Amino acid sequence: MQPQKTNDVLGTANRGTPAESGLCTLCRADCAGKCETWLSCLRGRDMLYPRDFGAITAGSANTEHQGVSYASLRLAGRVLGPGDDAERMFTGVNLSTTFGRGSGMAVGLPIITGALGSTRVAAVYWNGLAVGCALCGVPLVIGENVAGIDPKAEFTDGRLKKAPELSRRIAVYRQYATDTGGILVQQNVEDSRNGLAEFLAESHADEVAVELKWGQGAKSIGGEIKVGSIEQARFLKSRGYVVDPDPDDPSVSQAFADGAVRAFARHSRLGHADLGNFERLREQFLTTVDRLRALGFSRITLKTGAYGMEGLAMAVKCAAEAGLDLLTIDGAGGGTGMSPWNMMDHWGVPSLFLHAKAREFADALSQRGIKPADMAFGGGFAREDHIVKALALGAPYARLACLGRALMIPAFVGANIEGVLFPEKRAAVHGLWDSLPKVVAERGATPEAIFAGYHALRERLGEAETRALPLGAIAFCTLMDKLGAGIQQFLAGMRRFAVTDLSRSDVLAANRETAHETGLEHMAESGLEQARRILEA
């Protein structure tokens, strides 16, 4: 079913074609609003409710459930639950959790970012995103190739010795880090060849975890970026990357000079292409993990994509045998900063199918006495209902929901507002607006009037430090306020008062095909036996 472009109840609209997540398929940094996630960066938890209270009534539009996707799941509610009714409020639901071996990494909300790597939007909007994640205790993943494409990075004998951009990104997060959350740095084939792990061990071992990358939901090939300079394309080729078309080909050089070729795509190499079977992959993977631990990394994670059941089983089994802290499983429908578009639409296993099987595979290992790695589910998530559905579907193994594109939006919005309110900062923050759009201007002309989350931060940090924050970070915290309150409300309705209490019984299939594919109860059969016992008593 095609999501609607407008939601009259919330007063939201998509400028482009909406995806299942509620975001436009193409999310622009200069967008002037106003999808649900965009508006939530300003209004916070107020976006949970219908607009124009006192003059309206509102009714559900989501009554038909066709096909198999996260939209065909329903979240359960309950009459009975623990505690005294007079004391139980949704605001008391505990949003914090942990993941990983031992005592685990504590997180403030059950969310982790997707990997944000060598794309330009990740680099230029990093400050708002990173500071917001740190303040909210959200683990942040630095994606692949950041050091490899950095023109200021220095190598000795082919090994990375200095990576200014990567070190900057780590430092921005660490400046505001609390005792919840943390930062992960992703390593792909090129990163491994460049000695990224050794560099991190020497410079940042106590500050980061390492995420090994097998894939992502948006594509079945390695990471890409696009560059508009033939000199930069040649530089990236000299760093060992695949550049398409080849900037050293005389015909391509001439085509670029004539304006026929205007951009070059930089690609990463495929992983595991030379491995003929699972046993060889397993042996190499375990050796890699052992080497990382020997370098001093206490936390190691793995991210895999929408490769199908064999690839999923490999990831689940290897992550368990290696004792990894987290396995992130990104289904088709996942976002990207740069991927072939038709590949995004037509390859791989959609998120719900993949996540349901991941939970089944983890359960199979657990029944054999093998402890599965904690999991994060990703692939087209943006709202609080997505997060709760993913955690319940994967319970008790799924500890986090992985959000990518949705978490870039507050960084965009905040930077654009900052560039208008403080013109002297516009270039530095990469603001793209000449003036405030009507939907922003009608809220006010100061950060404290525009952002509903400003005042809680001022109470926590003080006036001076709050004034010094990137407005993208304030927008991020405002969005987290909405998502957090929304999660609390869903859980309270289930009579669950901590995200760690979620179970498979908290999510239901809305049609028979979804019940068959996921193993969930159909909503018309959930609790039916108990209902009959009540009637017969």
Image (cartoon, rainbow, N blue to C red):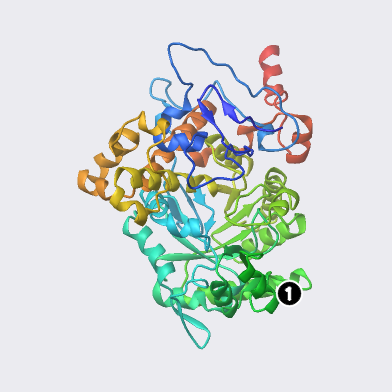
Q: Which residue is mark 1?
A: 280
Residues packed near mark 1 inside 10 Å, few (<14), some (14 to 19) or many (20 plus) = few
Q: Say above or below: 94 vs 535.
A: below
Q: Quadrant of residue 477?
A: top left
The residue at 52%/63% (across/down) is: 118
In the image: residue 263, left or right of residue 408: right
Residue sitting at x 40%, y 69%: 167
Residue nearest the viewer, comparing 169 with 294 = 169
Which residue extends farthest front? Answer: 258
**Residue 217, image x and y in percent?**
66, 53
The answer to whether residue 408 of the structure is visible from this angle is yes
* Residue 319, x across and y down, in percent: 62, 62
Q: Nearer the viewer, residue 11 or 77?
A: 11
Q: Residue 27 appears at what percent x and percent y?
A: 55, 45
Q: Is residue 250 left or right of residue 466?
A: right
Give, as a three-letter code, the residue at label 1. Arg
Quarter location, residue 320: bottom right
Q: Secondary structure at mark 1?
A: helix
